[in-house]
Amino acid sequence: QVHVVESGGGSVQAGGSLRLSCTIPGYTATRYRVAWFRQAPGKKREGVAGIDTNGRTIYGASAKGRFTISRDNANPSVFLQMNNLLPEDSAMYSCATKPVPWLQSLDPQDFDYWGQGTQVTVSS
């Protein structure tokens, strides 16, 4: 069983920044693809950003130019730096992973293990 733990959520004003962390104990950068998703009440789950084992990244339309996903190969963590946050970014952010090296899309069905999520609230 793979455990996924998110942290770093919180409340900020529009224009502010947050850095989310996804920790996967036992995670080996050469084996796992990792992605961030978000879901707001009443809305469909949305892919935010993903990273494969070679560091190749994919971003959802809402994240491009504002969010950056990165990976710390020395520790079992993946980060999502979110800048210039907007009220519409408010959602529960979840990290997901699958022990395969490549990343083709941000389809939630392509990920097997999920964390409980961390709440992000952006006020205007």
Image (cartoon, rainbow, N blue to C red):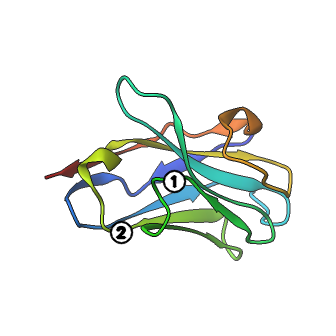
Q: Residue furthest left?
A: 124
Residue at point 56%, 40% (across, down): 115
Residue type (three-letter) at the residue carrying disc 1 = Ala
Please name the residue that numbered disc 1 is placed on.
61
The quadrant where residue 42 appears: top left
Q: Residue at x 23, y 66 (%)?
A: 15
Query: Which mark identifies residue 83?
Result: 2
Q: Which of these two is toward me, 55 or 46?
A: 46
Name the disc covering residue 41, or none: none
User: Residue 50: image x %, image y %?
Assistant: 65, 56
Image x and y of residue 30, in percent = 84, 66
Q: 26 or 61, which is in the foreground? A: 61
Label 2: element kind: loop
Residue extending furthest toward the top: 42
- Describe the element under mark 1 as helix, strand or loop: loop
Judge whether 95 appears above or below 81 on screen. above
C-beta proximity under 8 Å, tags 2 and 1 = no
| Residue 44 located left or right of residue 112 | left
Disc with the residue nearer the chain's start (2 vs 1):
1
Name which residue type carries label 2: Asn
| Mark 2 vs mark 1, CA separation in Å | 15 Å
Residue 98 vs residue 25: left or right? right
| Residue 44 placement (x, y as % from top left) | 48, 28
Asked if residue 36 can be seen in this view, the reply is yes
Tag 1: Cα neighbours inside 10 Å, few (<14), some, or many (≥20)?
few
Residue 25, visible in the rendered structure: no
Numbered circles on residues, count: 2
Residue 86 lies, in percent from the top left, at 27, 55
